[in-house]
Image: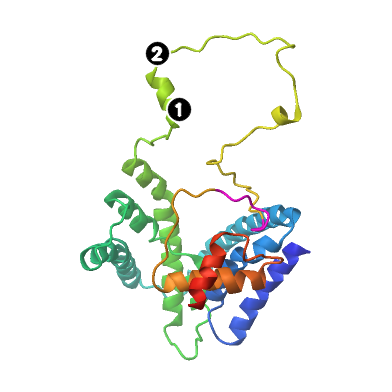
Amino acid sequence: MECLLIFCFGYLSYIASEMSEFSGIITLLTSGIVMAHYTWFNLSPQGKQASYIIFQFLGYANEAFIFVYLGLTFFSYVDKDWSPQLIGIEIFIIAIGRLFGTLGLLAIMKCCCKYKSDIDIRQQIFIWYAGMIRGAIAFGLVLRIDGDKFKNRDVIVTTSLALVVFTTVVYGSTVGVLQKCMEPKSEFKFSESFKNFLKSDKKIEKVDLKDDDYEMNSENDSMDLSEDEESEYEDMLHPNEAPVKKEKSVRKYKGCVKYMHRIDELVMKPMFIYKYEKNISKKSQDFFELFMK
């Protein structure tokens, strides 16, 4: 029932947007962000696990269906009008536009705003190359063009289809090779204790344990994970149930983000999260006092 309600709310947002002649894709994106931030904490433990598995399965299934549909549609448009010159120009424009959107914007922010980015040039090139893959959304949008109003509708549709298929096959199949060329040796991060062990000359001695020296109990039956390790299926407990952890560094918000964070903590979460206590965190009272000022 919980998974069905999540699906229905997302579908209703899409229908409302389409009826209002707005972008249904952007509406679904916004709806998903909001539900992930608020609705997730209202689900039961079974609902959290089931919704994660079900929507992941539906995502893979729909993605496979879309690519199969594009492959079959490609041959059904053979008799339509094609423009190789327009396809080549569009590929060039995509490459240049994506290059400016990654390396160019970071360079402008570095020069004008003195922005320091942790992304090196190799990672920027990888982002530029992987970002040139066009999806099926563009092809779905051009199919909605009215043929009576636009005489060159077939050329636009075939060009979009060619771009989607070309970028998906060429860039999608070679992005893994580019990653290996950019980073031939993957760095494996060891813990500090393991690094100290490797530096030391100590050897592991074989220890024989007797039955009398070791007793099984409930604490030893389960594998303990350190606090730094996070599982893919982490609990993401309700804010009232989550244990309070001592943070080494408190993140400071500035400008409009600071006020948006306060509104989220004091107004939005108590409204949309079931039994949310705004005073569960020690910072909430300080946020409330600063917000009232």
Secondary element at tag 2 = loop
Q: Is residue 63 visible?
A: yes
Considering depth in this image, is 154 or 15 the residue closer to the camera? 15
How far is mark 2 from mark 1, CA to CA? 14 Å
Decide: few, some or many residues near mark 2? Use Cα within 10 Å; few <14, some 14-19, many ≥20.
few
Residue 60: % across, % down: 61, 55
- Residue that mark 1 sits on: 193
| Magenta-span inclusion, residue 160 | no
| Magenta-span inclusion, residue 244 | yes
Q: Which mark is residue 114?
A: none
Q: Residue furthest bottom?
A: 149
- Residue that mark 2 sits on: 201
Q: Is residue 98 above or below residue 244?
A: below
Q: Is residue 265 above or below residue 15?
A: above
| Residue at (41% x, 26% y) in the render | 195
Going by the numbered disc 1, the residue's amino acid type is Ser
Residue 139: % across, % down: 49, 71
| Residue at (68% x, 53% y) in the render | 53
Considering depth in this image, is 79 or 1 the residue closer to the camera? 1
Residue 113: % across, % down: 25, 67
On screen, residue 10 versus residue 203, left or right, reads right
Q: Residue furthest right?
A: 1
First to last magenta residue range: 238-245
Secondary element at tag 1 = helix
Q: Main secondary structure of the magenta part?
A: loop
- Residue 241 location, quadrant: bottom right
| Residue at (45% x, 61% y) in the render | 165
Q: Mark 1 or mark 2, which is nearer the start of the sequence? A: 1
Q: Is residue 98 above or below residue 21?
A: above
